[in-house]
Image (spheres, rainbow, N blue to C red):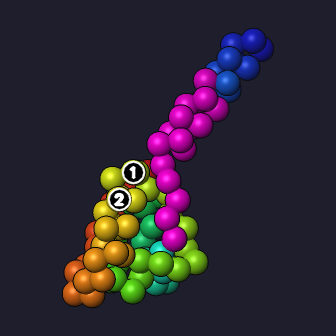
């Protein structure tokens, strides 16, 4: 019983550590992109999606590492409409 409690605490601490390394960004995702992300999550696979400049803000929330946050912020500020942005997620 005590071992089970310890294992649960370790898993909870690990999950909190991982979540502390991720940051929320708001983007606009198409239905196809949402399905692609859901499929990757279910299959525990990595995924890469492309976002047009006008999709770099919106109501959909993604948890991404800090380097992705910086890249998205830079592209938002650049105002370059011809550049596609790649987001890579690992589940």
Element on which disc 2 rests: helix
Main secondary structure type of the part rendered in magenta? helix
Q: Per the image, is 88 magenta?
A: no
Which numbered tag is attached to residue 70? 2
**Mark 1 surroundings: few (<14), some (14-19) or many (≥20) residues within 10 A:** few
Q: Per the image, is 25 magenta?
A: yes
Q: Is residue 20 visible?
A: yes
Q: Which residue is mark 1?
A: 66
Give the Cα separation between the discs numbered 2 and 1. Answer: 6 Å
Q: Residue at x 25, y 83 (%)?
A: 80
Element on which disc 1 rests: helix
Residue 37, image x, y percentages: 45, 67
Residue 66, image x, y percentages: 39, 51
Q: Relative to residue 82, is residue 33 depicted above or below?
A: above
Q: Is residue 45 visible?
A: no
Q: Relative to residue 28, is residue 26 depicted above or below?
A: above
Q: Relative to residue 71, is residue 60 depicted above or below?
A: below
Q: Furthest-left residue in view?
A: 82
Q: Furthest-front residue in view?
A: 77
Name the residue nearer the viewer: 75 or 90: 75
Residue 24, image x, y percentages: 52, 59
Name the residue nearer the viewer: 90 or 87: 87
Q: Relative to residue 62, is residue 82 depicted above or below?
A: below
Q: Residue at x 34, y 75 (%)?
A: 77
Q: Residue at x 47, y 78 (%)?
A: 57
Residue 82 in the figure: left or right of residue 51: left
Q: Furthest-top residue in view?
A: 2
Range of residues picked out in magenta: 10-26
Residue 39 in the figure: left or right of residue 50: right
């Amino acid at each position: 019983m005590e071992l089970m409690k310890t294992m649960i605490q370790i898993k909870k601490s690990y999950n909190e550590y991982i979540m502390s390394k991720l940051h929320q960004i708001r983007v606009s995702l198409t239905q196809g992109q949402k399905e692609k992300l859901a499929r990757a999550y279910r299959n525990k696979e990595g995924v890469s999606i492309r976002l047009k400049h006008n999709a770099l803000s919106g109501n959909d929330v993604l948890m991404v590492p800090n380097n992705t946050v910086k890249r998205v912020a830079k592209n938002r500020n650049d105002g370059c409409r011809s550049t596609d942005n790649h987001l890579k997620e690992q589940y």
